[in-house]
Image (tube, rainbow, N blue to C red):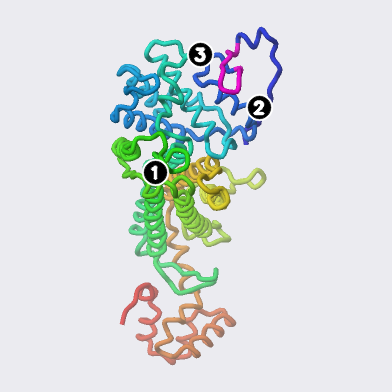
Amino acid sequence: MPPVVKKHPLDKAQLMSQFRTEKDSMGEVQVPANAYYSAQTQRAVENFPISGWTLPPALIHAMGWVKYSCAVANRDLGKLTGTGKNPLSDDQVKALLDACIEVREGKLDGEFPIDVFQTGSGTSSNMNVNEVISNRAIEIIGGDRLAATKPIHPNDHVNMGQSTNDTFPTAIHVAAAMQIKLSLIPALEKLHASLKKKAEAWDKIIKIGRTHLMDATPLRLGQEFGGFARQVELSIKRAKIALESVLELPVGGTAVGTGINTHPQFSEKVCAALAEGLDIPFIEAVDHFEAAANRDGLVQCHSELKTIATTMFNFANNVRWLGSGPRCGFYEVALPTRQPGSSIMPGKVNPVMCESMMQVTAKVIGNDGCMALSGAAGGNFQLNIMMPVMGHTVLESIHLLANSCDAFVDFCVDEMEANEDQCNAAVEQSLSMCTSLNPLIGYDKAAKMAKDAFASGKTIRELAEEQGEIEPEALKDALDPWKMTYPHE
């Protein structure tokens, strides 16, 4: 966790050189001299010295997209250049749009210093964005961004037709959808392709199955990895469901869902601009009162991420077990050597990529508790007041899952090798080989044979041959491991 920055007293000369004086409705504030943000941002920085975690860049960039789309809608509706308070010229509108583009492209990332654990609506961060866009737009048209009068005003123009209560959750939805589309789904597709390739390559390798961690009937290594591939394929579908759950956008509802101070077509136009610009089918919320009051879509989104995480934990843990050894474990799959595994045991190598992914998924599963509580308890009447932490958390989970999947493919799955000799060696020793004798001698006799084989140290085949109850050809056919890996008459 980043340390909380402690403040140090400055003398008057230092204050004059390092800070400038800004005013807002509450009075004067000392703001860093060269910052693009203004008084409200600085107040929030001072009020919330909590974690040292600022909003994720993906959320800031999404806010840039939302502000850009809002400005486009207001421009097209004639609101920015109309007869209202301080109408803008066409050049000023272009400067406003250009400043929004710089925010969404990450060119101003250093201008957003507010802690995640701030006002629950995200008002501080919304005003942070408004101030930065306002001052940068003024600078773009050649004005003095430090002047007290703002010809491109953070509230009147940048925030026109908006409230934090609708634009901030809109930005969270946009950021989550973007990151799922651009990062998580491609990473899962990459993992699926790698696993499918292994499944095909290892389809002829027979190994022993395990249920309850105990010996079971044979299967093919390719079938086992085909099962893993299917798990990831289903995870891709769940990621798409997660994306779909955030497509309805609250923008246009303003403070409580009524749309006060907003043009009736504003929401539709903003959503259309976002959909076109990002190639994601965003739509206006069906009911703006629901969209303002609840963050159920985000809770659903993260629940799908949690399910993906449980799948990834299961898969990584299975791979870890399959690679255990190399002499005293299963060692049916040889994992790539990534780094020394012990500070005291020379030559030891550990399944570090599996362990990394398992830790990631534990974090994501834990994050789901934060999302559920924030969604359930944070929403009172017309507003949820846990939005900054929800935005931070959902984006953290997407980021961790995507990066973990990418790394797992590059540094583990692609380089794994099957240990065919080890796979084959365990098959004949399995007492569950007697399962295929059920149709010939019945369950009870087969069960006794398994117990006798275990007690004597013999294989099922050796004991059955000694007993002579089954014809040799029938026994050979019944104990053919390959035939045990698929249904047949």
Q: Is residue 350 in view from this perspective?
A: no
User: Tag 2's secondary structure?
Assistant: loop
Which residue lies at the image location 61% right of the left edge and 17% below the top edge?
28
Disc 2: which residue:
5
Where 137 sits versus 253, above or below?
Answer: above
Which quarter of the picture shows residue 277?
top left
| C-alpha distance separating marks 2 and 1 | 36 Å
Q: Residues within 10 Å of mark 2 (few under 14, many from 20)?
A: few
Please identify, in this view, whether the residue under mark 2 or under mark 1 is nearer the observer.
1
Please identify, in this view, whether the residue under mark 3 or under mark 2 is nearer the observer.
3
Majority secondary structure of magenta residues: strand
Where 116 sits versus 209, above or below?
Answer: above
Residue numbers of the magenta segment: 18-30
Q: Nearer the viewer, residue 474 or 182?
A: 182
- Residue 148 is marked as 3
Q: Position of residue 205 (x, y in %)?
A: 38, 64
Rendered-image quadrant of the C terminus: bottom left
Q: Position of residue 452 (x, y in %)?
A: 56, 85
Q: Position of residue 185 (x, y in %)?
A: 38, 47
Disc 1: which residue:
249
Where 381 sits versus 81, above or below?
Answer: below
- Earlier in the chain: of badge 1 and badge 3, it is 3
